[in-house]
Amino acid sequence: MDGSSRSSRIQGIRGFFQFEASVKFICLIIIFGYCLSYFETVADALIVTPGYFLPPEMQIWTAFTFCFVERHLWEVLVDFATVALCGKLIEPLWGSLEMMTYFAVTNFGVVILTTTYYLFLYACTKNPLILFEVHIYGLAGYIAAVCVAVHQIMPDHLIARTPMGNFTNRNIPLTLFLVAVLLWLLGLLEGRYPTMFLAGIITSWIYLRFIQRHRNGSRGDYSENFAFVRFFPNVLQPIVSVVVNPIYYMCRRLGVIRHVPVPPATSNTLPLSSVSISMGGVDPYDMERRRQIALKALNERLSKATDSSRSKALPKSFPQSTIKSPSPAVSINIPTTTSSSPSQESLLKFTPDNEQNKNQLP
């Protein structure tokens, strides 16, 4: 028992050092901020208090330090899991610099939107407790931002089948926000958590939709799959469109955002060579990197399947080098979108060399 626990701890330490420097930096700062939370005076100087964010106090520096302070251990663990997911899934596609930029932009937007909300709430209620008893801290907004990024990269990835329909990545942000609201109503969460989570959804979507610069020089992700209404169930999308479309057109008229025309849909009768497959928010360089990762995983699975079939199928006295067992076909689901049907998924099926002749189309 002691040996297994020791080996698991060693593997955990090795896994931590396998992350990029940006992930390790964020995790270490979170640990340091959690330790500082035991010193109330120091923690109060690092977190955002709406009443002290304005003159005459002007504690502007708290907008850059609030996200590293956590006062509960479970929040620290959730932050670690979120940053690790970002390091494994998002950072290989975006790079360390873009991941740190996303971290900074979303957290700064979260503190601005959340503070503005509480100031507006104070203006409506005249309750001074809102100004001085509400504290904004933690990575709740960044957790929402990671959920939005996953929704952009793999929107139709199936997580579970439910009686109400398929639960995919596009349903994660709104579902977690509703869970946070429910826990707040039950008294299990502070009110700042669902507020920061909603601010994180809005900030990250605006950045990924209109601002993020890609390696090919383009900005944003104007695909239909990443429209704001796609965060909601199909039944609610027409109602949400009535609310958000006037805001969008007003921002376009004021020049806050620019309109990018959608390319015309291609005919279904075009040959396969003329159809281009694109993924929303991912440039060709990222698609090539994904393809290499998929092929690497495929080769590992094929090699393991070949070794196991050889060792089990042949007797010990039989020369194993004379027979080569066929490798099973492996199917990998890679979510892609075409210009004619953005929400479709393509199924890439890889077969070994000795099976290709059987599977070729006439």
Image (cartoon, helix red, strand yellow):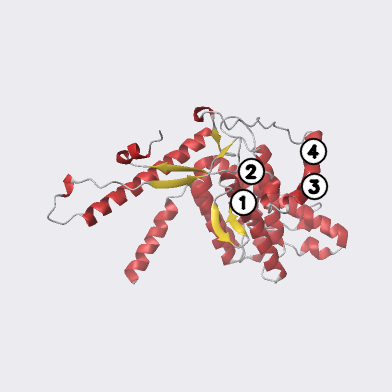
Quote the CA–CA distance across marks 4 and 3: 12 Å
Mark 1 neighbour density, 10 Å: few (under 14) some (14–19) many (20 or more): many
Compared with residue 332, is residue 41 higher up or lower down, i.e. above or below? below
Quote the CA–CA distance across marks 2 and 1: 9 Å
Residue at mark 4 = 249
Mark 3 neighbour density, 10 Å: few (under 14) some (14–19) many (20 or more): few
Residue at mark 2 = 225
Residue 242 got which mark?
3
Residue at mark 1 = 170
* Residue type pointed to by label 2: Asn
Q: Quadrant of the N terminus?
A: bottom left
Residue 53 falls left or right of residue 286: right
Q: Of marks 4 and 3, which one's residue comes earlier in the chain?
A: 3
Quote the CA–CA distance across marks 1 and 3: 20 Å
* Residue type pointed to by label 3: Val
Residue 152 falls left or right of residue 273: right
